[in-house]
Amino acid sequence: MSVAPIYPLKRPRTLTEQAAEAIRSRIVNGEFQLGEALSEITLAGELGVSKTPVREAFLQLKNEGLVDIQPQRGTFVFQMTSEQVRQLTVLRELLEMEALRIAMRGDGRRLAEILKDIMARMEKAVAVDDSAHYRALDNELHQHIIMASGNQFIEAAYSSIAFRVQALRNRLSRQPPENHRSLKEHRELVDLINANDIEAAVAKLLEHIRATLRAYTAFVEATSRG
């Protein structure tokens, strides 16, 4: 008598998890401005839930660095000074560069194939001026570099900054010149990975991240003036 396989049950997502996902998406995609005040009552009404899941979602998003909860004042979308952006970028450099070295010393050919597929889709997104799709693919490309390291601690460290990085990236990618610059740098990076030139690829990745830092810094400074 055969026994039917037992599959683990999927736990339904709580209202807090659903609220956090919805608010996170709006912050990362740029629907909320950096530093914007967030209303529990308004968000609860928009999401069709009570204030409790929204309040609990704020606590989760605070741990992700996406909101700032100020007692007696309220909850605000995160803001960053130019110096904080620089410090964030230093950590990003350390994690992504080492992840790329590890990945290329392991199965660089496999990584190159994955990234070439993403690049093909990025090319199409830029060709039709689909910034939303392009920035999602940009994030996917960098996440694959991290995951290709096979190092759970690098992945965990990167996840602690990933949403902030993506939120800033999304605000930059609304500018077509930024997308074209980014696309060119990604193309050069993938070519070097495909050629298995580890140190040249790492140097190109560093150049790309620092070019993005300059763009981030200009954006943050312009936002603070505005």
Image: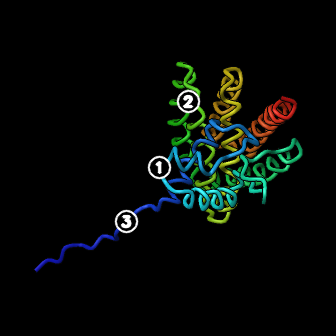
Question: Mark 2 to mark 1: distance in Å?
Answer: 36 Å
Depth-wise, is mark 2 or mark 1 nearer the camera?
1
Estimate the spatial distance between the alpha carbons at disc 2 and disc 3, rounded to whole Å: 33 Å
Task: Say which residue label 3 marks.
Answer: 10
Q: Quadrant of the C terminus?
A: top right
Please tell me which residue lies in front, 204 or 177. 177
Q: Determine whether the residue tagged by mark 1 lies in a helix, strand or loop.
A: loop
Q: Are marks 3 and 1 in contact (CB under 8 Å)?
A: no
Please tell me whether mark 2 sits on a helix, a strand or a loop. Answer: helix
Q: Which mark is residue 48?
A: 1
The label nearer to you, 3 versus 1, is: 1
Q: Residue 70 has which mark?
A: none
Q: Position of residue 9 (x, y in %)?
A: 34, 69
Where in the figure is residue 159, as x and y percent of width and height?
65, 56
Q: Which residue is mark 2?
A: 122
x 52%, y 19%: residue: 128
Residue 213 x %, y %: 81, 38
